[in-house]
Image (cartoon, rainbow, N blue to C red):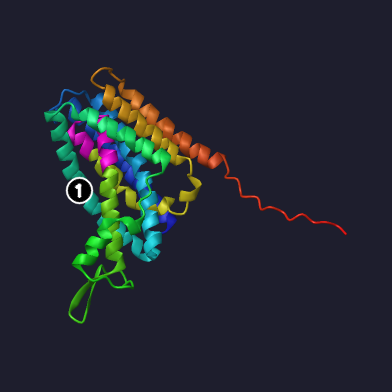
């Protein structure tokens, strides 16, 4: 089991590595190690902005992962195993989606408008109902049950167990499938969002990788604090709305490189700040009226 202290340490390590990688990005584009017309400074700004977008949108993913673990009653001692394999799967699936998205945008310029409208709809949906994905309604569970019988109990940290020569999936494997499928759903928001920042495959992929690699440790840091960040949803709505508008207008208006980074950082800081400063009002119980004799 990963303690909060250890998770904080690993989170700081991943954040440091992510920021340090921007040095390599600068020299790679400044000295043309990567075939691109961007300068080193432009590439660094796009990389950091993309990383911040992916990291902020992954916050909502953490909320859903917490819901999945609570629904399946996954013991905390086994959660790190689900997150480890879930992150490996996320790297693969997002790589495929990024490659497909880059090809679409480069071949069909009008796809930027499609992605822009989709992000605006995602912002509205998050503001209106939230993006919570109830585990019982996920078709992945029915799919798993069609392929394997599912045991009713956890078998330590095993995903499968053999009973009377029958291979059965454990609830831990079902939770893993849920984490993978919900991450793919969230990728349909986060990947178009970063295309509003850049369509450079190297910057899109590396910013995604570093954001995902730090997700496991970040979950254990925030798992006990999720209820306190109740205003963070509005920050994510602003970010999705901004990048959606930017995608729709990027062929008509040239946005400064620093503007996206400033808007995203200010939105996140405001959401966290309001969540910490404004305390949630406790429900006041109605007092019974006492009539003196």
- Compared across the picture, whether 188 is left or right of 263 comes to left
Q: Position of residue 202 (x, y in %)?
A: 18, 35
267 above or below 77?
above
Viewport quadrant of the N terminus = bottom left
Quadrant occupied by the C terminus:
bottom right
Q: Nearer the viewer, residue 101 or 204?
A: 101
Q: Quadrant of residue 234?
A: top left
Task: Where is residue 53? Give x, y as percent.
Answer: 33, 36
Q: What segment is highlighted magenta in the picture? A: 188-205
Question: Which residue is rendered at x = 29% and y = 28% of the image?
Answer: 45
Q: Tell me if residue 196 is in the magenta stretch.
A: yes
Vertically, is 201 above or below 227? above
Coordinates of residue 144 in the picture (x, y in percent)? 23, 63
Q: Which residue is pictured at 43% across the width and 32% down the height? A: 267
Q: Nearer the viewer, residue 28 or 264?
A: 264
At horizontal 52% and vertical 37% (from top left) the residue drawn is 274
Q: Is residue 159 left or right of residue 55?
A: left
- Residue placed most toward the observer, 284 or 263: 284
Residue 156 visible, this orientation: yes
Dominant SS in magenta: helix
Is there any visible trace of residue 26 in the rendered image?
A: no
Q: The residue tagged with tag 1: helix, strand or loop?
A: helix
Check if residue 213 falls in the magenta segment: no
Residue 267 located left or right of residue 188: right
Q: Please provide percent x and percent y for residue 278.
A: 57, 40
Q: Which residue is mark 1?
A: 93
* On screen, residue 171 above or below 24: below
What residue do we see at 27% from left, 30% from top?
116
Crowding at dot 1, Cα within 10 Å, few <14 / some 14-19 / many 20+, comes out as: some
């Amino acid at each position: 089991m990963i303690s909060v202290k250890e998770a904080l340490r690993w989170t700081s390590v991943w954040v440091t590595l992510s920021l340090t990688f921007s040095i390599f990005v600068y020299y790679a584009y400044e000295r043309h190690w990567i075939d691109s017309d961007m300068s080193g400074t432009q590439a660094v700004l796009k990389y950091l902005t993309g990383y911040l977008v992916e990291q902020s949108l992954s916050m909502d993913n953490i909320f859903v992962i917490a819901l999945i673990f609570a629904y399946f009653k996954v013991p905390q001692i086994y959660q790190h195993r689900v997150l480890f394999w879930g992150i490996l799967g996320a790297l693969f699936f997002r790589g495929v989606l990024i490659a497909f998205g880059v090809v679409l945008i480069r071949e069909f310029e009008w796809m930027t408008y499609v992605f822009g409208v989709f992000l605006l709809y995602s912002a509205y949906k998050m503001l209106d109902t939230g993006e919570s994905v109830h585990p019982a309604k996920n078709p992945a569970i029915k799919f798993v049950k069609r392929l394997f019988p599912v045991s009713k109990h956890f078998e330590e940290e095993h995903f499968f167990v053999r009973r009377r020569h029958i291979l059965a999936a454990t609830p831990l494997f079902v939770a893993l499938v849920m984490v993978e499928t919900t991450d793919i759903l969230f990728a349909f928001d986060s990947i178009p969002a970063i295309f509003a920042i850049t369509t450079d495959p190297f910057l899109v992929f590396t910013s995604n990788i570093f954001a995902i690699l730090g997700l496991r440790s970040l979950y254990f840091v925030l798992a006990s604090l999720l209820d306190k960040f109740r205003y963070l949803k509005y920050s994510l709505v602003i970010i999705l709305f901004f990048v959606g508008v930017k995608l729709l207008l990027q062929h008509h208006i040239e946005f400064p490189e620093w503007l996206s980074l400033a808007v995203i950082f200010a939105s996140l800081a405001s959401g966290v700040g309001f969540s910490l400063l404004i305390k949630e009002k406790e429900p006041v119980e109605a007092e019974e009226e006492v009539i003196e004799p």
